[in-house]
Amino acid sequence: MSALQQDICENVDIFLEEGNEQGEIATASLDKKFPRRYKVNLIVKQSCSDFPIIVEENPNYHSLFGYIETATYKGTVFTDFSLIRSGSLHRANGGVLLMDAIKVLEQPYVWDGLKRALRARQLSFTSLEKEVTLTGTVSLDPQPIPLDVKIILFGDYRTYQLLQHYDPEFSELFKVTADFEDEMPRTADSELHYARFISSIVHDNNMLHCDRKAIARIIEHSSRLSGDQNKLSLHSAHIANLLRESNYVARNAKSNLIRMGHVDQALEYQQMRVNRLQDSVMEGFVNGTTLIHTEGSAIGQVNALSVLTTSDHMFGAPNRITATTSYGDGDVIDIERSVDLGGSIHSKGVMILTAYLSSVFGKTAKVPLTTTITFEQSYGGVDGDSASMAEFCAVVSAFSGQPNRQDIAITGSMNQFGESQPIGGVNEKIEGFFDVCAIKGRNSEQGVIIPRSNAHNLMLRADIVKAVDKGEFHIWAIDHVTEAIELFTGKEAGTATLEGSYPIDTIFGIAQARLNALRK
């Protein structure tokens, strides 16, 4: 206080200044006649009882580390302590700062500055211009401030992996990792919490309230998003957007509540905006450009199911798989792989079905046939092993000369013992075949074969559920590929004896007899 008293005595004329012009000149020239010299610049104010938790939405250099402003008067640029401005790190000091990792990495010099501050455990007001040597202007250099802050970076797993791989300091500075689930178990308790979450969105956005059926429909849609009957999706943004659109539909309908029909209509609108590719694919079935049969039977031919994906939409469609045979040495030729249209996983699936085929028909002698399989009218890349059971059924049909039903489609992979294995996109695949059957003509014998391990993933459209309940459409869940052969042909697949032979009245027995005839 004595130094302050002495300074005031030396500059007493600053309080006696009568003309504004003289005060402005003194301010601009930064001489001792400066009224701001006795002011206090409070850059951060925190309550002792509150734990600071700061979320920085725009983590650029100035918003994080603070900066020193400058003022201009009649061509003169000046600054002083009163123009020091705080950043998010100052406001979060002693607490927690949360930021999006991608936004931090997108801003120049922020990541290096953040690591430097965490290593030194102090904050300095070094200007960004000085950091990049864009200016040689003399400015203030305040003392560094001790830093005690916890920084939480949130982002996707890929960003975490890149930082961990390319920045050796990342693991040292950010020692705790939390990997969050994007889905949760569906129980009576979690459904209650989900209903409360829906209610909170409604209240926060001043929407119409949902009735019970609307809430149940949104929860069902959440399970569909997770791809499992027993789980709920935690992608809250999608549910919030669905509620907003449902609220819009309900208000347009002059309703006092959001009802299930409004939710269904909102979902239809969402799909309608992004399903241009699906409409184009289905048009091929309407005009006959894409060849497919949904009735009758054919030898060496099976309706398989695939999923097509865009950035916003995923849908299923049937594909015709055919198999032909010729006299040879037992090779299975995958045309997709031969022309580099087949992915590595698809090629692996073909090799697995080849191994099982050899174990069925080639235990005692070499299979005297060369088999060729392909996806008909497929002009892009093919990957995944979900068609391996379909390909096996086509090959067995070609071996035995027994036709496969065309009103049945199949999806599922298999192992070297013929056991079915789960696949992805089962709902979209079933719905795709159902839609094509509607285009070509529905009958009560049509259906889809899926692996039994995919049964818990079924979250189908209401019209398909209704058709299944009425017996107008069928879904068969199987454990082994031989069950699919029996459904396709209407005959037993056959069980081998100790000598490796099959009953002559079975599919495998008929195929074995034809192969034995060729061996002679």
Image (cartoon, rainbow, N blue to C red):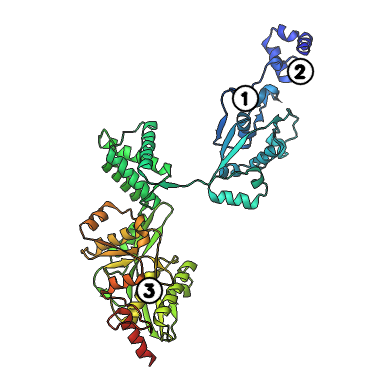
Estimate the x, y position of residue 288 in percent, counting from the top left: 28, 67
Q: On screen, 3 above or below 53?
A: above
Q: How many marks?
A: 3
Residue lying farthest to the front in this orientation: 498
Residue lying farthest to the bottom in this orientation: 520
Please identify, in this view, whether the residue under mark 2 or under mark 1 is nearer the observer. Answer: 1
Category of crowding for the residue at label 3, using alpha-carbon neighbours closer than 10 angstroms: few (below 14), some (14–19), many (at least 20): many
Estimate the x, y position of residue 209 in percent, counting from the top left: 31, 34
Residue under the image location 76 percent in, 16 percent down? 32
Which residue was labeled with disc 3?
392
**Marks 2 and 1 close (CB-CB < 8 Å):** no
Estimate the x, y position of residue 388 in percent, counting from the top left: 40, 70
**Which is more N-terminal, label 3 or label 2?**
2
**Which is more N-terminal, label 1 or label 3?**
1
Left of 498 or right of it: where is 175? Answer: right
Element assignment for label 2: loop
Which residue was labeled with disc 2?
31
What kind of residue is marked 2? Asp
Q: Using the image, tell me which numbered label, if any, was put on residue 326.
A: none
Residue under the image location 35 percent in, 42 percent down? 188
Which residue was labeled with disc 1?
44
